[in-house]
Amino acid sequence: MPSQNPKQNRPAHSALILGVGSFAQSLGGALADAGADVATYLTRNYGHFGPSLVGATFSKESFPSPVPLIRERKIAVVIPQSIDWALQPWSSDLVNSGAGIFSPTGEAMRIERERDFARELCGRFQIPFPKSFVAANRIEAEKILAAHSHPFVLKNPLCSPTSPIHTVLCETVEDTRAWLRHVNYAEGVFLQEYLGRAEAGHIALISGGQIHSLVTNQEYKYAFNGNMGIVAGAPLGGIVERDEHDKYGLARQLIHPLLPWLRQVNYHGPIQVTAIERDGQWHVIEYNVRIGVTSGPMIMRMLEEPLESILKTARNEKLKLRFQPAVNYGCSLTLAGYGYPFTQIRGPQLPLEVQGAFDCDVWWNEVAANPDGGLMATGQRIADIIALAPTLEAAIAKAYANIRKLRVVGSYFRSDVGQSLWPPGTV
Ligand SMILES: Nc1ncnc2c1ncn2[C@@H]1O[C@H](COP(=O)(O)OP(=O)(O)O)[C@@H](O)[C@H]1O
Ligand SMILES: [Mg+2]
């Protein structure tokens, strides 16, 4: 017998998260609060402590495949953090396991995995997409640059958390030429025309052949205040605005035209578009098939019934999203550790002190517990602090009040989240 959820008087469901760190802890925490029985299959070798606080955790070493766990624990829904699950030897067993997957599968995943496929789709449905090319090696890439004298952003052609290339922003032709001498061509390179900095994102759930807008969002991806430094692997902060009516038109312009394709490939799951405005027009720079590590935890806190929304989407059922009243904005801040954003640098494990009680969500990323009960920062992304509020100002203030309760030597956070790049279209 499934146990009863005392809050909603409904049978509990079991959810299995594939991930680590603050993503797994935050999703697990939100779903546990909604009455789910939560477990995490740890997909990477760090960030195990956070998820262990919200449910059982299982390592790859002890469980080469998560599929037996799905049977044993009667898992209703699996929530992947990234798309690399689809490349694992157990991926088809997972798809056939009977559990719902909170992600599109098969052909539908190509919209994130293959950048050139996303470009082609946009062409097919007349969605603006920057001029882009795929090159197999440096000689081809330099020929493209010679023929098209633009600055290009350099990206992996095939997206994966383990890609040899992480996005490199080049703002001039000379920047591009310099970086083309330095990138790893093992999987080739995707060159996408640089469109400037007026960026925004929009996230929706697709289920039952319909698009349901959730939020419009911003991610602060430059490592340092004032949007300076490099674009880090994951953002330093983010904001989301509840936006089921798509007030900025991002879904209407950049997601809705895809509807025939979405239905054709039986797409169900989250979709996120990242876009840049140039000359008064939004251009798609990327689609993701996930709610994302920055926005996902905030979305979970905005929904009235996060578990039900995830389950129904995984099952491709008709959705009716309900939002928490007066939770209109979220702010996420990351506490970065020694050496961030340069991943080549490694520091020692360092004590993490918490001064006072938190009054918003704090999710642990690269943190471990000491035998004496204290906490240690074990890597460059330490924690994500997430606050939700009726106004953007209140959400930001709350997140900052809480991140200031954390102390790790050599750590830092951006102190200017919300002061640029918002509202969408602002630089
Ligand atoms: N064509 C572009 N023009 C300007 N900035 C870009 C462009 N493409 C990417 N960027 C910047 O780099 C970031 C990461 O690129 P993205 O395509 O989202 O790849 P990923 O998230 O896989 O690294 C974007 O959020 C944006 O800030
Ligand atoms: Mg992106």
Image: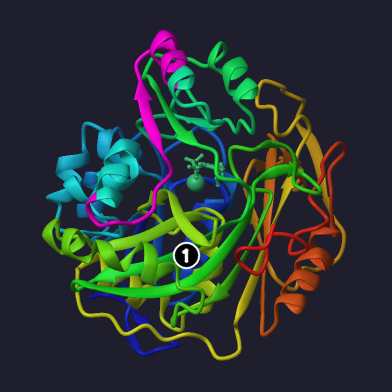
Q: Give x and y (percent) for residue 370.
A: 72, 40
> Residue at the location (22% across, 45% down)?
68
Q: Give x and y (percent) for residue 91.
A: 21, 40
- Can residue 66 be seen here? no
Work out which quarter of the rendered image holds the N terminus and state it: bottom left
User: Quadrant of the rendered structure where residue 119 is?
Assistant: top left
Work out which quarter of the rendered image holds the C terminus and state it: bottom right
Residue at the top extreme, as displayed: 139
- Can residue 357 be seen here? yes
* 320 on left or right of 35: left
User: Quadrant of the rendered structure where residue 60 is?
Assistant: top left
Q: Verify whether residue 263 appears in magenta.
A: no
* 393 on left or right of 75: right
Q: Nearer the viewer, residue 277 or 394?
A: 277
Find disc 1 in the rendering and name its residue.
202
Give, as a single range, the part of the protein colored magenta. Answer: 124-144
Q: Is residue 338 above or below residue 393?
A: above
Q: Give x and y (percent) for residue 216.
A: 52, 69
Q: Is residue 155 above or below residue 79?
A: above
> Residue at the location (27% across, 65% down)?
257
Q: Amino acid at mark 1?
A: His
